[in-house]
Image: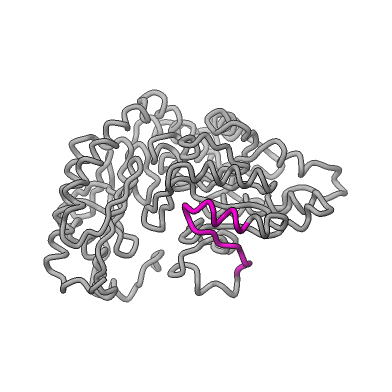
Amino acid sequence: MWHPFTQQRGWEEEAPLFIEHAEGADLFDTEGRHYIDGVSSLWCTVHGHRHPSIDRAVREQLGRVAHTTMLGLSHPPAVELARRLVGLAPPGLARVFYSDSGSTAVEVALKMAFQFWQQQGGEAARRTRFVSLRGAYHGDTVGSVSVGGIDLFHSIYRPLLFDTLTAEPGDAADLERILDSHGHEVAAVVVEPIVQGAAGILLHPPGYLRDVRDLCDRHGVLLICDEVAVGFGRTGRMFACEHEGVSPDFLCLAKGITGGYLPLAATLTSERIYEGFLGRFEEFRAFFHGHTYTGNPLACAAALASLDVFEEEQTLERLQPKIALLEDLLGPVAALPGVAEVRQRGLMCGIALAGFPIEERMGHRVTLEARDRGAIVRPLGDVVILMPPLSISAEKLTRLVEIVGAAIAAAVAAAPLPVAA
């Protein structure tokens, strides 16, 4: 096998960990050892593993139909899920287009925004450019990489990509400068609201998202909010846009949408955008995009059950004390040698380690130390990410942070002195 974001040569010396089963916030390997899932199996397992309600919903749907195309057909779970998502989303989002992953959810929004302006004709057809943020990450398909801003992941593909305008994250004045100069040719601004996840849990200042919305409105530009990482409770609200009362023109959802069970994504948009694609058949104004597994019934059933769990278990309400607890627990971690900064929003946390040589792979060292102590975490470079399931108990959350603190201390103690800043 060839694993994602993995230098396979390293695995000649370091055997991979094989996960055999899971329960709640715990993973169990093939040797019977168990670990706290400190990253929600890549930020998607919302209610923990093997949740009875979601298990049951998938089994029941399996007894009906596992897959049927949405090209020319429909099915009840997709319709019901669309209705539920529109009811939860910020006001003005009225239409749902399904796809398979966070990357494709963003790709859909980019293509919809572009095609919308082209079909308006006249001066509107000049709106062909996109503005994205430095340090952005929106997925790995070519369109979503084009609006990405992390050189480590994206620079090698530059010859394949379309050019974008890049704004400084959190700096509304910089975005205003760009739109003042180029607003007439911009189709949309693309942002991860409140928190840029893959940038290392980079937090935007209060009011920034509201300023972005206002600037887009002033210049007639569409706003795409990528909530693949921050949606479904990660920041303490169902959607991060809610923190500043912002309604985007496109809302991109994936990861936690099915509770971490099955691949599914949704791009929500407004009635205005939807109507821009209506016309006679011979006008060819339809949205020419689709996926084989779009709106898969099993995935939709899991997503509906996950939304039910949010309501029945009062997930967001019960999350607030855990967010406060995490903040308290991170205080001692921030004071550890080698830790430069701790960034937290909701149950998302990035622990930035000080300037160690890249070849020391300090983030990876911490991962291995944490694994030895019974927790799975994954770094982004030398930023150690904590993003446990929202359902994690206070006791297990405390243990997770204790393990990570001990892992950092051990890794730093065994490493050469940090390089000078």
State the residue at coordinates (55%, 62%).
Answer: 166
For residue 207, above or below residue 114: above
Closest to the observer: 72 or 366? 366
State the residue at coordinates (64%, 55%).
Answer: 179
Q: Which residues are magenta?
A: 161-178
On the image, which quarter does residue 258 sit in? top left
- 397 horizontally vs 83: left or right: left
**Residue 59, how many percent across, how many down?**
44, 34
Residue 166 magenta: yes
**The N terminus - image quarter:** bottom left
**Residue 55, how many percent across, how many down?**
39, 35
Closest to the observer: 29 or 10? 10
Q: How many discs mark residues in the rendered view?
A: 0
State the residue at coordinates (40%, 37%).
Answer: 233
**Residue 345, how many percent across, how many down?**
35, 43
Closest to the observer: 335 or 116? 335
State the residue at coordinates (37%, 43%).
Answer: 45
For residue 413, above or below residue 49: below
**The C terminus - image quarter:** bottom left
